[in-house]
Amino acid sequence: MLMSAPLHFQTIAELSAKLSVGQLSAVELTQAMIARTKAVEPRVHAFNSFDEADALAQAAASDARRRAGQSAGALEGIPVGLKDVIAVAGQPLTASSRMLANFVSPYDATVTQKLQSAGAVLHGRLNCDEFAMGSSTENSAFGPSSNPWDLTRTPGGSSGGSAAALAAGSAVATLGSDTGGSIRQPAALCGLVGLKPTYGLISRYGLIAYASSLDQIGPFARTVEDAAIMLGAIAGHDPRDSTSFKTSLPDYRAELKTRRGPWKLGIPKEYFGAGLDPEVGAAVEKAISFYRSQGCEIREISLPHTQYCLDTYYIIATAEASSNLARYDGIRYGHRTSSAKDLLDVYQKSRAEGFGDEVKRRIILGTYVLSSGYYDAYYLRAQKVRTLIRQDFLNAYREVDALITPTSPIPAFKLGEKSADPLAMYLCDIYTIGVNLAGLPALSLPCGFTQSGLPIGLQLIGQPFREADLLATAHAYEQAHGWNTQFPSL
C-alpha cells in the first residue's frame, strides 16, 4: 500500500478533497505550511516577506465560508505563494530590488483578485531576480534562493523563489511570471510543473512590468492536474489589460480526462545540438520514446530562425525594460537618494543606488537600441525577426499538434558558477525564449533525474490558446511516470 506524502508535499487535488470532507481545516493546513516554512526557510530563502497573521486570518475566513456552505471555489483554503512582482493590496511589492524595498502595494493584481475569488489563502511574497531579470535568482537585492534538491545550487530564475518554495513544501502552489523562460526553467531545475500560458490569456494588470510584450503570469504546481486547476482560476479576459484576449475558457481540469492522444508531436532539430547536457538529452529522448510507444506520430521538424532567438530577445526585452523602468526616478515612489544636490542628481543617484548591476546592464542596452540612429538597425530589425520566429512555429503546427524539447540545456548549476559571465547565464534560456517571442503556451514537467539526483525538465510547446490540449499531452506522460512523487529531503 502506497503511503501518502507528508501534508506539505500533497497536491491541491488531494488537499481540497480533505478540506471538503472536514478531514482538514484551512487553518490547520495554513499552520502546517507556516511551520514548514519556518523549518526550511533559513536554508532555502524562498520568501522576501511573510505575513503569518494575515495568512491565518484568510484561512479562518475560508473555514467560516465552508461552514456556512459558501465555499468560494476550486482553491478554497489552499495556501498559494506569489512572486514578488504581483501586487497584493497592503503587502510589500519589491520586485526583489532596493528600488522598491519599502514599497507596499495599494491595490490587487487581477490574478490576486481571481485567486481570492477562488478561495485561496495568499501565502507570502516570493524571491526573484531583480525586476524578473535573470536565470538564477542571484540578482535579488535580498540574496539568492537555493534549490531544495541541492542547497549549493540555483533554483533557476527569475521565478526562483516561487519554484524553491513549492519544491521545499512551503506552499501548495505558487505563481510566477515568464518573460523568457522564468517559470519553465525554474520548474525544470526544481522538479515541478511550470506553465507559461498563451500571451493574453492571463491579465498582466498588477504585474510589475519587465518587457510588456513578453511577460506572462503562470502557475507552478506539483502535478499537471494542479496546474490545470490553477490556470482555470486565473485565466480570463480583463478590460484593465489592453493585451488581454477574449476567448472561451474550457474546464482545463475536466478536459485532462477527455482529451486523449495519440498526438502528432514535433521534435525541433535545432533544440538537440551543441550545449545540451548528455543526461538531459537522454532523459528527453526517453520521454519521446514513451510518446512513440503510445502511438503518437513523432516527426523531426525545423524552426530555422531559432539561431536568432537569443539576439532578438535581448534587443526587444531590454528595449521594453528601458522604457518600463524609466518610471523609477526617485520622485513619485521607490528609492530616493539622500545626497542629491539638484533634480538631475535625484534622478541619477536614485537610479544608481536603487538598481542592481544586471538591471543597469539591461537598461543601458535597451536605451542604446532605442536611441536615434540605432532604432532601425536593432529594435525594428529585431521585431521583424520576431515575426519570422513566430511564423516558424505556426508553420510547424501545420504538421504537428505540439513540440517536445528540453526545458533547460543543463540541470541546476552551482550558485555563483555563472554570475561573472552574463552570456553564459543568458544561454540557460536558449530553449525557452522563442516561446515568449512567439506568444505561445508551453509547459515544463519532470522527466527524470541526473545521476547526482538533480531534476530534469521536459518542455511541451503548444498552439495558441490550446492549453487544454497541452495539459492533456503532459498529463499522459505524467500519469505513466512517478517523477512528481519524489521530493527533496532537506
Image (cartoon, helix red, strand yellow):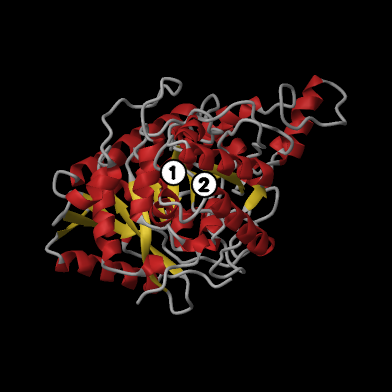
Split into 4 quadrants, where in the image is the N terminus?
A: bottom left
Would you place residue 29 above or below residue 317 in this image?
below
Split into 4 quadrants, where in the image is the C terminus?
A: bottom right
Where, by quadrant of the figure, is residue 33 drawn? bottom right
Which residue sits at x=28%, y=34%? 249
Find disc 2 in the rendering and name its residue. 80
> Horizontal placement of 326 versus 200: left or right?
right
Where is residue 412 shown, x and y percent of the image? 51, 65
Where, by quadrant of the figure, is residue 338 drawn? top right
Front residue of 18/364: it is 18
> Horizontal placement of 336 versus 155: left or right?
right
Find disc 1 in the rendering and name its residue. 75
Q: Earlier in the sequence, mark 2 or mark 1?
A: 1
Which residue sits at x=56%, y=33%? 208
Q: Secondary structure at mark 1?
A: loop
Would you place residue 355 above or below residue 200 in this image?
below
